Image (tube, rainbow, N blue to C red):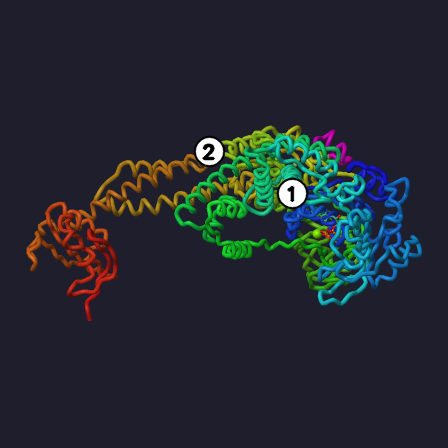
Amino acid sequence: MKKLTTNQIRKMWLDFFKEKKHHFLAPVSLIPVDDPSLLWINSGVATLKPYFDGRKTPPAPRLTNSQKAIRTNDIENVGVTARHQTMFEMLGNFSIGEYFKKEAIEFAWELLTSSKWFAIPVDKLYITVFSEDKEAYKIWTEVIGIAPDHIFSLGRETNFWDVGQGPCGPNTEMFFDRGEKWDPKKIGPRLIADDIENDRFIEIWNIVFSQFNNDGTNNYTELPRKNIDTGAGLERIASIFQDTPTNFETDIFFPTIKKVETLCDPQYTYSIDNYMNPTPEQTKINTAFKVIADHVRATSFAIADGVFPGNKDRGYIIRRLIRRSSVYGKELGIRTAFLYKLVIEVINAMGEFYPYLKTKQTLIEEAIRTEEEKFLKTLAKGYELLEKIINEDNKVSAKNALLLFESFGFPIEQTLEIAEKRNVDVDLVGFEKLLAETKESTRNARKDLKAWDKQNELFTKLTVESKFTGWEETEHENSQIVFMFSGQQEIQTVTNDTTFVILDKTPFYAEKGGQAADTGTMSNDTANAIVLDTQQGPNHQHIHQIKVNGTLKVGDHITAKVDEDKRIYTMKNHSGTHMVHSALREVLGSTVMQAGSFNDENGLRMDFTFNRNATEQELKAVENLVIKKIHESINREVHFCSMNDAINKYHALAFFADKYDDIVRVVKFGDFSSELCGGTHVENTKDIEDFIITGIESKGSGLFRIKCLTSFETVNEYLRNQFKHYFEEVEILIDKYNIAKNHLVDKQIEQHFDKIKSLEISKNNLDIVKKLISEFKDLYKSYDKKINDILMAQKLNQFKDLKPTLNSHGVNEIKLFTKGLNIADLKQLADELRNKFADLILILGSETENDNFIVVAVSRSLQNKYRAIDIFNNLKEFTTKGGGNANLAQGKYFYKQ
Ligand code: ATP
Ligand code: MG
């Protein structure tokens, strides 16, 4: 067997498929784009969905890649099985409607066995196929010449890929035999045939023949266009070529493990021998090393892609990985934050294929270090709390165990361990039940779906040419209708109906890259149509949804006219999006990465990643910078060029580019902004006119959404509305003041109000008005309190001559039943009377419109004999509802029936 490094294996794979005319796709971010069904990219093919379901035409029908993927449902397997990682790399080759079973199998065999490539001895390889797939079986045995005892026909569970509805098909798997050493019971190839979990036969490659469509009720029909989708785990192949017991001793992870050994308590070392002759203690130690090495790699990559530790979604996964590794670090005797020290090992192992990691080293280290330090602090608090719980309750209830786990990130194993040492019980069963309940309720609706959208045959076969002219014009006079369809049916003519058309030349922009679709009209002598929507077809055609009045036929010439007003304002907002993106990066730093945007005629919003909240000053600086650039009147440049030129010559930002196109389009405003973009833009920054940030919100996991407006008209209207809203707020208060001022005049309030009302509506005054309003509210609050005191004093004034009389027990008592006082008034009156007279019992009642209120109070000196609450509960004339103590009782009273 050849000895190959991971980098050599990856390169050999990609070189092989490039030689077989496959187009190489560079790895893309772990964050799925435009795919709410996935939390993470979880396979190589997940990045190619639009090509497979026909929404987009692939750059070539043959593709190859090596794609990083995260599978959160494998986290618990990490360090326990030999071959699961949280993040792994999947090598793949794909055919989109081109070659099928024979070529796919031939390619695989050549790559695996040819001496020029992997050169794996033929007798080391085993194959499985789906039992009903006679074709694949025949190719393997007759074309390739696999010996009958090296191929197994198996059932649906292992060899048919189906997710209910959508494309599906049989697959064929290739296994590598690591020899009897890994098969202690000497079971042999039956391990494959009977699908027995084992370490001898490693599945290295899986080819899915996407052949049928499942209509959802297991009716299978042949797909119009058949695809090949393959996946091979790079780490597993590395362990074969490096002959290591698990994936963790390969050159990807082992340097990290070795580094951990230098940081942990020297009594712990990683033992390779443990795999063959395991001892429980060493297994535990090895697992800790493996988990740490795995998690720090996944975390580093995720952070590099813009995911920061947080409380939700992706951010939460990263937080969990950091916490888990930190806890495992503790098991190895590490007491301080250490994970960030391993980042350099990840970069050394992975940097060749992922050079951007190096440029993000500091960012990754800092994000990990901060998170781990924060965690260690909460963990210390958890220890304290657990101590307290044990001392007070002498047990740990399910609720407390969950509290420790959820709020303090305190692992249940630690709770159990400490409780055991202290000889107290933990309600583990209850804890697990509670945990399952919370998990269930917070379970993410997203499922790791692998399904493609159903193929629409008509749609995927659309090859008619259509040219977009809308970068230069908003009206095209002589466009010809070249294709029309309704539902899944091609049609030739439409009368008074809604339908879809494609034009040979169209000025209508199709929704894409965050820019809204153009709308407008199409017309000729026979018909007028409203263009409701414009979307992209598989070959970049713009497909218009139109509502026709009259009759239109394929071949007709029409005038296509974009709603110009809408387009102009959309352009301002799209250019504004580029400006705010650059400004954010300049003010907050280049860790800001755009993560989606949307702009139409009404405004713009942009999502971006950043590891903390931006301050008000920073946002102001961003706003000012954009305005400065508008005032600088920078001309727009557009360059059609290679990706290489876009990045190196024009320094374009390219996070979400259509990276597979040969020629890309760069939109550039001087040195300030340069982005890959197919959108329509203003000619000069001064055409954006004006700019304002109207809000920013956190979307969790280090993702923020900023909202902005452009153009004089829109910004002014926004300001008018804001001011109107603020004025209305103070007017409500000033109306109340005008009524109350008979009792008390407050010059300060009046002046403040005048000041607010006289403010001119302008951007500069927006902050001033906000400040004045909040001051005004404070002033009014203290004024309101004064007024209430005055009103209460006036109300209570009528009782100023009240005097106690002796009751039947010879104790001072004031008993008053009156009207119009509420509980607060009664309590105030009780306080005043108790201050005035000593040794007193008070029974004060009042009827109001809605309720009868009562307060009973007893002077402190009498409370050993008479308790307010007892008197309250035992009144002769009334029943009462309420509560209190010896000093005071309050509530409502009711006449006895
Ligand atoms: P397994 O049963 O081992 O979890 P799988 O059936 O989930 O594998 P596929 O979905 O077929 O795997 O993915 C294709 C290849 O990706 C696998 O053959 C394997 O080499 C690799 N792979 C899958 N999951 C992981 C993982 N968590 N860590 C490393 N490699 C993986
Ligand atoms: Mg799996």
The C terminus is located in which quarter? bottom left
Q: Which residues are magenta?
A: 639-651
Based on the picture, tell me whether residue 649 belongs to the magenta stretch. yes
Measure how far apart labels 1 and 2 are at the Cα level. Answer: 60 Å
Based on the picture, tell me whether residue 785 belongs to the magenta stretch. no
Q: Which residue is mark 2?
A: 764
Q: Amino acid at mark 1?
A: Thr
Element on which disc 1 rests: helix
* Mark 2 closeness class: few <14, some 14–19, many ≥20 residues within 10 Å: few
Q: Which residue is at a point 56% across and 46% down the rendered structure image?
A: 312
Q: Which residue is mark 1?
A: 287
**Residue 368: mark:** none
Q: Which residue is at a point 75% across and 63% down the rendered structure image?
A: 214
177 or 528, which is in the foreground? 177
Q: Which residue is at a point 52% across and 37% down the rendered structure image?
A: 376
The N terminus is located in which quarter? top right
Confirm or reject: label 2 Cβ below 8 Å from ligand 1: no
**Which quadrant of the view contains residue 669?**
top right
| x, y percent for residue 859 | 15, 49
As displayed, is residue 878 above or below residue 684?
below
| x, y percent for residue 6 | 77, 38
Q: Does the image show residue 362?
A: yes
Residue mark closest to the camera, 1 vs 2:
1
- Tell whether label 2 touches label 1 (CB within 8 Å): no
Confirm or reject: label 1 Cβ below 8 Å from ligand 1: no
285 or 523, which is in the foreground? 285
| x, y percent for residue 498 | 69, 61
Which mark is first along the chain, 2 or 1? 1
**Which quadrant of the view contains residue 652?**
top right
